[in-house]
Image (cartoon, rainbow, N blue to C red):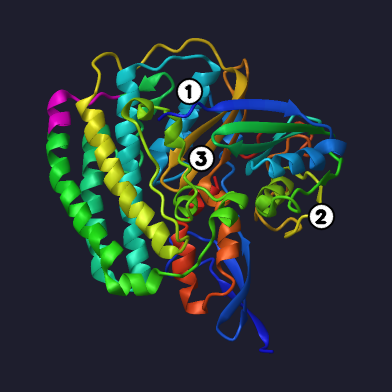
Amino acid sequence: MPERIIVPFGPQHPVLPEPIHIDLVLEDENVVDAIPSIGYIHRGLEQLVQKREYTEYVYVAERICGICSFIHALCYCQGVEHIMKIEVPDRARYLRTIWSEYSRIHSHLLWLGLFADGMGFENLFMRSWQLRESVLDVLEDTTGGRVIQGSCKVGGVRRDIGQEKLDEIHRSLDLFDQQCRGLGDVFLNDDTVKYRLKGLGVISKDEAYDLGAAGPTARGSGVAMDHRETGYAAYGDLGFKPVVETTGDCYARCAVRVKEVYASIDLIRRAIEEMPEGPIDVKVKGTPDGEYFSRAEQPRGEVIHYLKGDGSKHLARARIRTPTLANIPPLVKMLPGIQLADVPIVVLSIDPCIGCMER
Amino acid sequence: MTVKEEQTTTDVALENLLQEIEALHAGGYRLVQIGCTDLDGSYEINYSFDKDYQFKNLRLTIGPETEVPSISGIYWGAFVYENEMHDSFGVPVTGINIDFKGTFIRTDEKYPLSVTRRRGDRCQNV
């Protein structure tokens, strides 16, 4: 029997923009066990809810993550609105949907670039990030912020998008769709990519469900679960079906994200076409008294903001469960049985967002 | 088709916790999260489960020194939430399948989110 050794993976590693540590137990080149540890950049943002007024905490919620920032703000606002029984205007729901989907596209293109880089496919990395720039340009154009949009607030949104700009975005989507499909074609059909990803880091449907996997990690294993199906924001009006793959390997998780980019473009297109006229916010009076588990679908999966108010202007508790934390147990199960050289790709395949996890 | 989401919260006694969770597991529910709230002298722990967007929440209220049995024997992935709950609030959880013994979340301050363990100080260093 080969001797067992422990090789530390991270907290600093070329494929990791943020720190996470995994102790890999190896027999020769084969991984037989993996033990994760986190907490290198824990910020305690949940605790800040006791020091910021509930309307101000939107800014903190948005800063939990630099990628899915808008959806954090949206999820938080929806939670407060549910507790306070605030009905958000239709136009605000549609605008929230457009910005959420742009956030998803920018996150997926970011990940696709990092994934290509992890595979050593540098041209694909550059092309992914080139396309992502045009998404950031739209976000900047419509909200003023490329990373932190600051556009969501309790009771609606802060900014409207004029009809001229909406028409311009709508026109640009055809070319963008075509460019994304060209990029996606490489991820889905290139022999090198397929050879590198197929059959790697497999997790079955039952395992993914039982381990509490979220987002593309779950959907790549055939678990048809996407919180947009519950119809929050304008998803109920627009209709939505989750993108699902069944092989449960790195290729499947990649394919889900590629196809979700196409789905997001379609959602934005339809949201613009069906955008209702009217106000973008309502006046908010009073303070939250009650509790709610607000859920939304981030690019990495289901995020939960548990909010508890006691009738004061500060919430008593905000507990945020991010999808990366939910995807750690599946990751631990994916690693045993693979080669050391494949570990970076498998770790990347869950799209770990340590900023979210260490909120 | 839009699925209507429903949320329910049920109080559970410590002695019935594992039995109730075993029943949810057998019923096909997935573990969504375990979260703790400090009630300034006691802890409220929410065990959240989901099946087809139906959200069930079991609520356990305990004293600060009460030991809570791990549910990682039923839901293997529960170890992340249980270690987090221990490291953030100091809730003693027994029998976790991967027990980091206080080193899962590396913070300078021990139990940083616990008002109870900081004797009423609601938020330090702000």
How packed mark 1 is, by other alpha carbons closer than 10 Å (few <14, some 14-19, many 20 or more), is: some
The quadrant in which residue A7 appears is bottom right
**Which contiguous range is marked in magenta?**
A159-167
Q: Do we see residue A343 in this rendering? A: yes
Q: Position of residue A11 (x, y in %)?
A: 54, 66
Magenta region includes residue A161: yes
Q: Amino acid at mark 3?
A: Val
Mark 2 sits on what residue? Answer: B95
Q: Which is nearer the eye, B2 or A50?
A: B2
How packed mark 2 is, by other alpha carbons closer than 10 Å (few <14, some 14-19, many 20 or more), is: few
The chain containing the residue under callout 2 comes to B
Q: Do we see residue B122 in this rendering? A: no
Mark 3 sits on what residue? Answer: A303
Q: Amino acid at mark 1?
A: Thr
Q: Position of residue A301 (x, y in %)?
A: 47, 45
Q: Element under label 1?
A: loop
Left or right: B8, with A139 as reference point = right
Same subunit, labels 1 and 2: the answer reads no
How packed mark 3 is, by other alpha carbons closer than 10 Å (few <14, some 14-19, many 20 or more), is: many
